[in-house]
Image: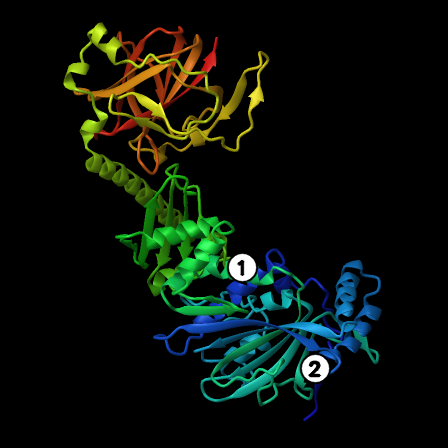
Amino acid sequence: MNICWNFPNNNDGKISGISEAGIETFRGELLKSLAKEICQNSLDAVLDSKKRVLIEFKLYNIPLKEDRRISGLEEIFNLAKNYWQDNEKTMRFLEKAEKNFKKEKIRVLRISDYNTTGLTGSDKKKNSTWNNLVKSTGVSDKTGSSGGSYGIGKSAPFACSDLRTLFYNTLDKDGLQAFQGVANLVSFEKEDIVTQGTGYYGNSKDNTAIRNMDSFGGYTRKESGTDIYIIGFLDDEEWKKKVVEAILENFLISILNDNIEIKVEDVLINKENLSFLMEKYKEDIELTYEYYQVLMEKDSQPLEIEFKDLGKFKLYLLIKKDFKRKILISRSNGMKIFDRNRISSIQFSGVCILEDEKINTYFREMETPQHDNWESDRHRNPKEAEKIKREFFAILKEKVKEKGKETILDEMDAVGVGEYLPDINDIGDNSENNRENIDNKKKKFDFKKITTIEINENNNIKEANSEEKDFVNELSENGDIEDKVGSEEHINMSDESSGIGNSDLRNDEKSETVKFSHISPSSIRIFKVFDEEEMYKMIFKLEKNTEKVIIAVSIAGEQASIPVVIKKAKDNNGKILESKFNKITVKNLIENKKYSILFSLNDNENYPVEVKMYGDKI
């Protein structure tokens, strides 16, 4: 048996260039893609499901000249340079690779897994896990909740190699051993024969594997599993940190479920030390840290939802101030697919896990090759898939709204409705009585964005600590600060379904984007009037003459505020005021004059409400 590198003749067929589709797919985030593809493959190959799958990332610096398996490629790269000297992109790759052969040592990353089946069927010519990984392109036999759908995930490690070269070593569950190298390069000419772009290190006669195990760096495998060696591993000083973060981001659920343990050099990632790692890396993986809080919330019980005839999925939700309003979508094996956003204006985070095999299989058909999105056009029935996907997302949105409403009501029950309502004697229209209860303390005309407004015991609104947000202030002609008021402040409510209640507006009505300054009233009170219409009464004064004021109404909660839909609004004389979604418009207001308005909500529950005011000064 002649063991060496062999690049088969292309028989005057296709010439392979540098832009191999599978490798280019993973060019965006190399280490993130590497970690995701490696870990999902190992999870899919678990041997004993009652034990953890173990994965290890270990970097070596191998003396180059002492190892002919690597140094033997130098001649190949020289031949490729002669063949592609007129192609700038290919030459850049080849010249970068050539620098590795001029060094005394070369970087080799070993990735090993344990408690896995290994790559079975290394003695077969086709239809085995060995051949699907090592010898095939665009082939995958995985189904259901298993990882790969396109068979191009195997390209992720190649993208992390300066030489585009890997070595595979396995001891499978049946005791079969195999070792083989694969170089995913470009066509070149040797002895007047043009080769294919892919070459193999092994039995040169038929490009089959060596029938025993081998290794780099003195490592010896003693149990079933697979080793992948990335030759000329990319030179990135932060590679360890990036891999750890990628694992935490993509396999948080698997780790919490105790299904997987990963060691990246000296960093051990498992269920026991997950809390420590999340605290350490939380500033770099803020969204994942939110998901972690969702899953670790005390007394948190997931919603178990039957979706059509596809089976069950679980949904964890947590309402909390400043959360990023996204839901992690995960397969049943705990691997993250993507973050679903644009759900609601409620500040929350959530985790959704597809539980049953059927629902995993259905949505897996929509996954992109990188396994980071659902695209209905990829499904065998695109129109049906788009409809199913929309219905699924609609359920998520509805459950977030229900959770937001439930959270507000729970806070009211805990504190007591009386905290938010005045004494019955304060409700009358006696002007003296009203005057005594109004806080006449003057405040500066404040242009900062007020993040929360609280109602104190006297039913006066007090400002919490203001904080600057990332919006651009502009100066008007008279030197006043103005800023755009958008959906974050609940003025431009382009999605009325995000709030409590239902809008009577037509679906084709367009939301408006207005340009006003945030203003603080000099005094304000809000309380509920228990009449037939169940209306709220708001009494306030302004420091400045204001041509137009927009009042944005929300339900006040400890963790978040929820915009509500205004049913009707009127002034103290019974004149109907303009209202849309959660905003009420009042015009031509005079400084230091007391104004009173009444408004009702589509939902008749008793809520603690808060308002934010935006004005255009005269």
Viewer-nearest residue: 289 or 405? 289
Q: Is residue 117 shown to the viewer in this render?
A: yes
Q: Which residue is mark 1?
A: 370
Q: Position of residue 239 (x, y in %)?
A: 60, 62
Q: What residue sits 77% from the left and 61% below the top?
A: 92
Instruction: Looking at this view, name the residue that lies furthest to the bottom.
Output: 1
Q: What residue sits 33% from the left and 48% below the top?
A: 317
Q: What residue sits 33% from the left and 38% below the top?
A: 559
**Secondary structure type for disc 1:** loop
In the displayed structure, does residue 181 sit left or right of residue 189? left
**Secondary structure type for disc 2:** helix
Give amino acid for label 1.
Gln
- Rounded to the nearest angstrom, the CA distance separating label 1 from label 2 is 31 Å
- Look at the picture and state if 212 lies above or below 518: below
Q: Position of residue 201 (x, y in %)?
A: 67, 82
Q: Are marks 1 and 2 in contact (CB under 8 Å)?
A: no
Tag 2 or tag 1, which sits nearer the N-term?
2
Q: Position of residue 396 (x, y in %)?
A: 35, 47
The crowding category of the residue bearing disc 1, from other C-alpha atoms within 10 Å (few below 14, some 14 to 19, many at least 20), is some
In the displayed structure, does residue 61 sit left or right of residue 388? right
Q: Nearer the viewer, mark 1 or mark 2?
A: 2
Viewer-nearest residue: 289 or 317? 289
Q: Quadrant of the N terminus?
A: bottom right
Q: Is residue 383 shown to the viewer in this render?
A: no
Q: Which residue is mark 2?
A: 69
Q: Position of residue 311 (x, y in %)?
A: 30, 59
Give amino acid for label 2.
Arg
In the displayed structure, does residue 58 sit left or right of residue 47? right
Viewer-nearest residue: 130 or 111? 111
In the displayed structure, does residue 339 sit left or right of residue 2? left
The disc at residue 605 is none
